[in-house]
Image (cartoon, rainbow, N blue to C red):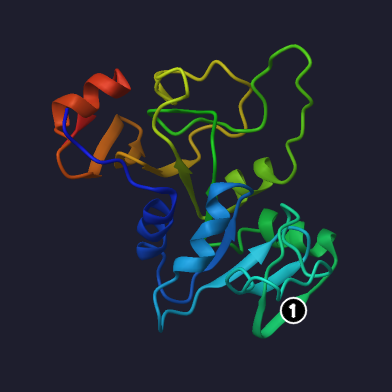
């Protein structure tokens, strides 16, 4: 296997490329927040945060952070012209009401048919903290995942059936990983793209599931 994984920055740029002009988008805690820094120039994407912000911009320059202006992950953000603040109950109404075109989330596991597990591993001592993940996964018109394909133990996060507590059932449309982009369909996984040097057969070996071309 002679291939180069996408860096987190490259992965964020890959996700940003697919967000259409005029989209209302929520970026989940962790890796997905980096997508805000890679929205293509000239493309209007309205970013929402469940703590009550609409119209977020990229991360502030070093030294320009305002810790009264943060996203749901408590990271400093910027506000674009026309941006707005509002109560988090109104923000959740926006999420639950189907007003988001896309949400980009992280995941512990995702099934080939789009079941999502991203809020708890179910391990003893783990503190459940689902936040707005369930509302986003079901409320957004499309749920995309952004994650490493493999765990630190080298196991695929894409599985036949999730063993962790579920966030949502058949809700994931696309999976953006450091090695490939995949679509979840009722008939299983469908390949969108691969990193250079990685073959389809090698991807199937890593995932442990068939991937339609």
Q: Is residue 81 left or right of residue 196?
A: right
* Frontmost residue, 40 versus 96: 40
Residue at image position (30%, 32%) is: 189
Give SS at disc 1.
strand
Whole-percent x, y for residue 119 in the image: 66, 32
Q: Is residue 167 left or right of residue 102?
A: right
- Toward which corner of the image does residue 64 lie, by quadrant? bottom right
- Toward which corner of the image does residue 157 lie, by quadrant? top left
Whole-percent x, y for residue 166 in the image: 61, 26
Q: How many marks?
A: 1
Quadrant (top left/top right/bottom left/bottom right) for the C terminus:
top left
Residue that protrudes farthest toward the bottom in the picture: 81
Residue tagged 1: 84
| Number of other residues with Cα within 10 Å of mark 1, as a class: few under 14, some 14 to 19, many 20 or more | few
Whole-percent x, y for residue 1 in the image: 17, 27
* Frontmost residue, 10 versus 21: 10
Q: Is residue 17 left or right of residue 47?
A: left
Residue at image position (44%, 49%) is: 8
Residue at image position (23%, 19%) is: 205
- Toward which corner of the image does residue 61 lie, by quadrant? bottom right
Residue at image position (45%, 17%) is: 153
Whole-percent x, y for residue 175 in the image: 40, 42
1, above or below 99, in the image: above
202, above or below 96, in the image: above
């Amino acid at each position: 296997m002679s291939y180069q994984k996408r860096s987190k920055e490259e992965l964020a740029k890959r996700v940003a490329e697919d967000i259409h002009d005029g989209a209302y988008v929520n970026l989940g805690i962790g890796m997905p927040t980096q997508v805000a820094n890679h929205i293509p120039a000239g493309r209007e994407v309205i970013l929402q945060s469940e703590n009550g912000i609409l119209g977020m911009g990229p991360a502030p320059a070093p030294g320009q952070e305002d810790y009264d202006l943060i996203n749901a992950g408590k990271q400093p953000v910027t506000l674009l012209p026309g941006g707005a603040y509002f109560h988090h109950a109104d923000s959740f109404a926006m999420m639950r009401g189907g007003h988001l075109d896309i949400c980009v989330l992280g995941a512990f596991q995702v099934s080939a048919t789009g079941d999502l597990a991203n809020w708890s591993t179910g391990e003893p001592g783990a503190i459940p903290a689902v936040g707005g993940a369930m509302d986003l996964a079901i409320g957004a018109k499309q749920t995309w995942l952004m994650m490493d394909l493999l765990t630190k133990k080298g196991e695929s996060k894409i599985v036949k059936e999730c063993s962790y507590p579920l966030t949502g059932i058949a809700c994931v449309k696309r999976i953006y990983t450091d090695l490939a982009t995949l679509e979840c369909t009722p008939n299983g996984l469908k390949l969108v793209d691969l990193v250079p040097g990685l073959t389809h057969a090698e991807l199937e070996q890593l995932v442990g599931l068939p991937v339609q071309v």
